[in-house]
Amino acid sequence: MSRIGKRPIPLPAKVTVTLDGQSVVVKGPKGELSRVLPSGVVVMMEGDTVVVNRANESRPARQQHGLCRTLVANMVEGVSTGFQKKLEIQGVGYRAAVDGRILTLNVGYSLPVKIDPPAGITIEVPKEKNTSVTISGIDKELVGNTAAKIRDVRPPEVYKGKGIRYEGEVVRRKAGKSGKK
């Protein structure tokens, strides 16, 4: 039995879950998320908790049991508290700015890079610290993908450490060329 899959998901106040076959709809104070789960799992309400069980003991059902429980738990957490990722920009002259919804990155290319985030994602850059970017939203997958796309504009390089990195990410540094002796 999956250790993650058998844990019940407690529902916070003001969060409702609607089940319709394999479709799960979660509504909360921050918004609404829906997802269709595979046929190998069964989602049930038990009081104020959601329980994810296997439909049978087949290999695909066992593989997807813990995954589906985590997906539903992330939906519940997203509509109640939301998710956020923080990025740091390091490098001389590297900076970010937000104009409306569009994120503009100046990271060493000849022209600034403009990124339009998908619906449901908000990007913030503090006025006093234009080397910090915060991506937030209710869908954990979308927040993570957007942060990864922004990081891919200029990933941190190993010689000087310049680039865009996650907050707290440690970049292994390499030694440069050694001079002639």
Image (tube, rainbow, N blue to C red):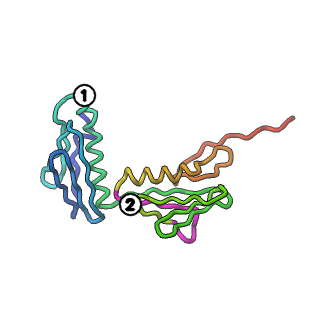
Classify the position of the N terminus by image quarter.
Answer: top left
Q: Residue furthest front?
A: 111
Amino acid bearing label 2: Ala
* Residue 19, label in figure: none
Dot 2, crowdedness within 10 Å: few (<14), some or many (≥20)? few
Q: Residue at x 29, y 59 (%)?
A: 79
Looking at the image, the residue that sits furthest to the left is 47
Q: Quadrant of the C terminus?
A: top right
Q: Identify the residue at image location x=39%, y=53%.
A: 142
- The answer to whether 109 is drawn above or below residue 7 in the figure is below
Nearer to us of marks 1 and 2 is: 2
Please say if 113 is above or below 22.
below
Where disc 2 sits, the SS reads: loop
Task: Please state if 107 lies on the left or on the right of 32 as rendered.
Answer: right
Region in magenta: 125-138
Label 1 environment density (alpha carbons within 10 Å; few <14, some 14–19, many ≥20)? few
Question: Which is nearer the eye, 71 or 81?
Answer: 71
Q: Position of residue 99 (x, y in %)?
A: 51, 69
Closer to the chain start, of discs 1 and 2, is 1
- Give the CA distance from mark 1 to mark 2: 36 Å
Return the residue at label 2: 119
What residue lies at 47% left-to-right and 53% top-to-bottom? Answer: 147
Q: Position of residue 8 (x, y in %)?
A: 21, 47
* Left or right of residue 77, residue 115 in this image: right
* Residue identified by numbered label 1: 59
Q: Is residue 88 left or right of residue 177?
A: left
Name, please, the residue furthest toward the right: 181
Question: Is residue 37 located in the magenta-colored stretch of the structure?
Answer: no
